[in-house]
Amino acid sequence: DTAVSQTPKYLVTQMGNDKSIKCEQNLGHDTMYWYKQDSKKFLKIMFSYNNKELIINETVPNRFSPKSPDKAHLNLHINSLELGDSAVYFCASSPSSYPYEQYFGPGTRLTVT
Amino acid sequence: QQQVKQSPQSLIVQKGGISIINCAYENTAFDYFPWYQQFPGKGPALLIAIRPDVSEKKEGRFTISFNKSAKQFSLHIMDSQPGDSATYFCAAKGSRRGRSEKLVFGKGTKLTVNP
């Protein structure tokens, strides 16, 4: 059973389009995250939700909007896609008690042309 | 203060050798230090983690050494194998008022183990 799953795995789209990435976890965790990994492999947190409440919102363009319908799901919607948005986006989840071990999904490779 | 500095950027080791990756941090509020392993095309996977009240933790061929006073920690891979070839990330996290703070990652080390 996949612990943290994401769809789609690959996403190729043109500049200006709007796209969504979905994430689901079956670990019973309370907290979920979105990370962006750039071409240099640097991992940077974008958002974090705890029980559907936004708790971390890094400096991310307003074009990115996370939505958590319940604590097992966290989606990422991106408006007006730009070339610089091309990256791999990872969803992760963790429990809300120490040590808050984070488990990552397989990633969504977004390519904006 | 939120940074975790990781070195080296890349590492080439012969099969059977020891791989050592180092990380340093400034924020003394960090209380959890995990290492992640990432293979190409896959998500980072938690490898091993340590708390600051422990100086060493070993799991199989993987060992974390932690030096609280120097604010440094390192990953040692004993008897390195070609299958260990991956990118390794150190990370650090703290908590505040019982709530988890964000996980801060190092920039990664690409390990290549030659057969």
Image: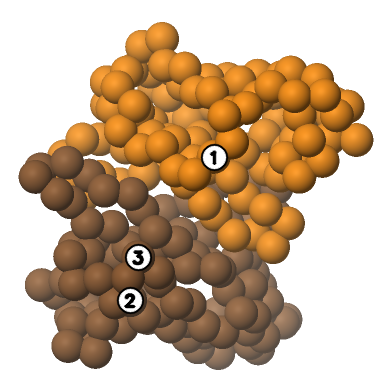
Chain colours: A orange, B brown
Per the image, the residue denoted by label 1 is A60
Q: Is residue A107 left or right of residue A70?
A: right
Q: Is residue A66 left or right of residue A86?
A: left
Per the image, the residue denoted by label 2 is B25
Q: Identify the image quadrant of the C terminus of chain A.
A: top right
Residue B63 spot, x, y in % from top left: 34, 76
- Mark 2 vs mark 3, foreground winner is 3
Per the image, the residue denoted by label 3 is B2
Residue A43 spot, x, y in % from top left: 54, 54
Label 1 SS: loop
The answer to the question of whether label 1 and label 3 lie on touching residues, with beta carbons closer than 8 A, is: no
Q: Residue furthest front?
A: A62
State the image quarter where residue B91 is shown: bottom left
Q: Is residue B67 above or below residue A83?
A: below
Q: CA distance from mark 2 to mark 1?
A: 24 Å
Near mark 2 (Cα within 10 A), the count class, few <14, some 14-19 or many ≥20, is: many
